[in-house]
Amino acid sequence: MIIKHAAKKGFLSKEVDYNKHKFTLTNKKNAFYTSNLDGKQDSRYNGLYTRINDEYFKTLESIRTNGEVLEAVKYRNSVIIKKSSLTENYYMPEAINALIYEARGKGRLEIMVDYKKIFSNDNTIKPEVKRLNGVWTVKFNNVKPAYLITATNLKLNESMNESLINYELDEHRNSMPSNRTVYKIFNAEIKKPLRIAFIVTDDLDKGLSSAEELLKTRLKNKDSEPVNESLKKLIFNKRIIAGLPWFIKPWARDELISLKALLLLDRKDLFKKIIMNYVKRIPGNGLFSNNGRVMADSTGWLSKRINDYLDAGLKFSSEERELIINELSRAVKSILKERSRNGLIINNAGETWMDSLMRDGSRIEIQALQLSTYKLMSRLTKAPRYVAMERKLKKRVIEEFYSNGVLHDSPGDEVFRPNAFIAYYVYPELLKKSEWLHCFKRLLEELWLPWNGLASVSRQSILYRDVDDGESSFAYHNGDSWYYINNIAGICMNDFTELREYANKIKESSINDLLYQGSISDCSEISDAKEQDSGGAWAQAWSAATLIELRSLAP
């Protein structure tokens, strides 16, 4: 199979073995469609999801045709799939809860539906299918009815049949249930060019008129910059969602880590808007939470991004500056009151980015982020106390974390993990450059993988696993390679002439993931340590954002 990307400077192309490759389209607002290239879905999270009454629901399960995939060409809002006797085009218009499907050639078509909340495993609702004014309406009777309006120039044969689907990816990820009953509602023989416009709505009349308009709309497949577009497609309603298919909300840690890429994409106004929104919402304890779980690094990442904004030569108004000072000052007081122990900042179990691990106590990236906060407050206020606090914490961190040329994950912890790269990224002043160089070389000895990534724990550790175990989650932070950490490590190592080769190799492996693995034109969450692949969420914001950063650096 050949995968192509329609980039601004021409097509990028490579021949690969088909390995359940996917594509993911979004309307950059509140809907997405994700499917295997061959249409045979391998996850219950594939399909057309739209937000209805503040919750995401699936309606369209799949569009299936016969034939082997020979070529897939990815454009900005669409993908063209070429089979032996059929060429398909999937297109998602911006800001509309719709999917447009076109096909030319000959083949057999089946359309399946499955109405469910995104995280629910309840049985699907049997749809009511009617022909209304030349348009098919697929009604799902819930508390409030929802409709999948289907307008087409093709003669569809109604066929209300239950079908049990086995989802191979879910089974592989230990994500149960791995099978589900859905409904085949239409079939047809494709003999001439066709178009189908699917609209999801809870307003029947509005949906009918919109579907008819879309059916007549001329589509234009636009080229793009694949690396940049991998993040842009995840900006929903002027916020960065964490990832697809299941991280469908903005999470503080993920969004703040992803933010610097907006400066590189010349989205300065959006960057500032998001930053100030966080500043105004700093909780009383000084730290943001997600689903009730505190993120111990969240306010530190906020400080880091404010520093980045200032480093870019950008300014806040006097009112914004005063608000930042007041809110961060209050946050620092709360964090010190509740979390200062023996001169270090502690976190509870499950509060760091490695949230499948206990990892409580004092952790290196938390200290570095706190130092970044002190650095910012000193910069904004010129108050000597913040200079003193920064100097004091820096001294304690070196005393407790740095020994034998290694910056350890926590005091006395001899297990090598990649978090020292985060520490350098947010606060390079912690060590001398020669000390950082030695530290990174030791980490590479323990963590470097043959396919040019980093393991999340030393390959020598008894905890190390080289293959992801899905929702069992043991390998998640004990071996799995995280693309965003790889990219951050590459950004760090690009500062060192001796390590620039590693930075370039990481960039190449991350771009390979983006272009030719998993969901094409999307950055994966993780890979197995054993060999490079696409794992976890198949469109992850911080993987895309940090790749944009890494790619922006001079080689």
Image (tube, helix red, strand yellow):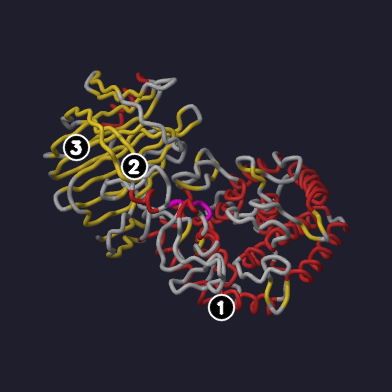
Q: Are marks 2 and 1 in contact (CB under 8 Å)?
A: no
Q: What percent of the width, then of the height, locates residue 550?
A: 53, 64
Q: Is residue 214 left or right of residue 122?
A: left
How far, Cα to Cα, is label 2 from label 3?
A: 31 Å
**In the picture, residue 154 is in which quadrant?**
top left
Please state which amino acid type lies under the numbered disc 2. Asn
How far, Cα to Cα, is label 2 from label 1?
A: 42 Å
Q: What percent of the width, then of the height, locates residue 535?
A: 43, 56
Provide the residue span drawn in magenta: 537-542
Residue 540 covered by magenta stretch = yes
Q: Earlier in the sequence, mark 2 or mark 3?
A: 2
Q: What percent of the width, then of the height, locates residue 86?
A: 17, 48
Please state which amino acid type lies under the numbered disc 3. Leu
User: Residue under circle 1?
Assistant: 445
Please state which amino acid type lies under the numbered disc 1. Glu
Residue 229 covered by magenta stretch = no
